[in-house]
Amino acid sequence: MPRRHHTTASKANESAWKGYAEFLKGQTEATKARLRVIANPGLAALRQSPVSIDLRHKLAEACPEKAHNLPPLQEIFHDFFQFAGRHRAEYPCVAEALALRKEAMTSYHFAKKDLAAILVGDAAEGQGWRDRILSAGTIEVEKQSEPYPEVGWYIAEAEDIYKTWDNWLRERKMPDSRTKCRLCKKLDESKLQVNLPADKSAIFIDASTKKLIGYVFRDWCGDAELVHQVNEIVVDAVEKSISVREDAGGLVLAGWSAGARSTGLFDWCNNLRKKNQSKDSAFALRLRQSSVFAIMWNMCLSGLPDEVLLDCEDWRRRSLIYPIQVPHHT
């Protein structure tokens, strides 16, 4: 194990932290707000709060020779927390905030462990989530001379659906002149090689080459509460500034954009720089979004076929797109 880097002389630290702990003993709304932040289990909350400014300022006062080369915030927080823990009897309000923080962190770790067991499987329990997903039946299919259903058509599975939409599609005025009008055809089941039931999963491979073609995994997540929470984040992330002529609703973009239809280009979305959002609320939303992406990607790593994962990694390296990074908790 590498030795922990000690930032400044311990006596100087003690002086700085004692002054801040004394400040937090005051029962004002400002100090109560700071104590609530300290009780929060997320390091991100501390970084975005006045507490980080306070601690750095106190340490800079105690060590003026190092004022322009202070240690990382995580080390500063850790050192202050250690001091407060050793002097909990002198500063009960700080000790209470740290106890709440510890309790929240314990709850967070157990919740994270339970979620990981649900999403990616627990090795101690034998067959994991990956085994359940990949245990889907394998179906061999032949390559056809022509694709079916035909590309560029809407397919109606029933006669009443066909009658409902056929006339509307023929008579409607296209909102975007650049888009070709698509018409409707009735499904010809005799041309289908496989009709997979709605409750079945399957992995499709080429009958000749035995290579993966595609897959259908039902109940991908398996946790209804998580799906609900993710949906709430998606709703919060809808950006009204994106105009789509054929979509009367909203389009969600987070992080990277594929660019305009006529000029494909991966780059940061403009909505990351919205001016009508405070820095704190924007950071909180982006943190929730990146956490959802991280959950999804970990599920992919645990459950998708190796061919798909290797293809994704190869594309990422060639495109030079940045990988997902999620702030750590402390």
Image: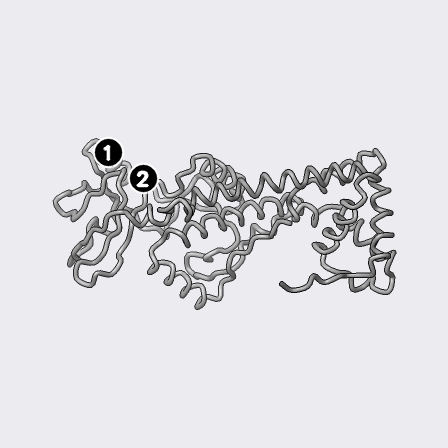
Q: What is the crowding at mark 2: few (fewer than 14 residues within 10 Å), some, or many (at least 20)?
A: few
Position of residue 5 in the picture relative to residue 26 (left or right): left
Depth check, mark 2 against mark 1: the one in front is 1
In space, the residues marked 2 and 1 are separated at their CA atoms by 17 Å
Q: What residue sits 56% from the left and 43% below the top?
A: 109
Q: Position of residue 329 (x, y in %)?
A: 62, 49
Q: Is residue 117 left or right of residue 157?
A: right
Q: Is residue 221 left or right of residue 81?
A: left
**63 or 317, which lies in front?**
63
Residue 4, placed above or below residue 227: below
Is 72 left, or right, of 200 in this rendering?
right
Return the residue at label 2: 172
Q: Position of residue 228 (x, y in %)?
A: 47, 35
Q: Nearer the viewer, residue 295 or 19?
A: 19
Amino acid type at circle 1 is Ile
Quarter of image, res 100 = top right
Identify the residue under disc 1. Answer: 161
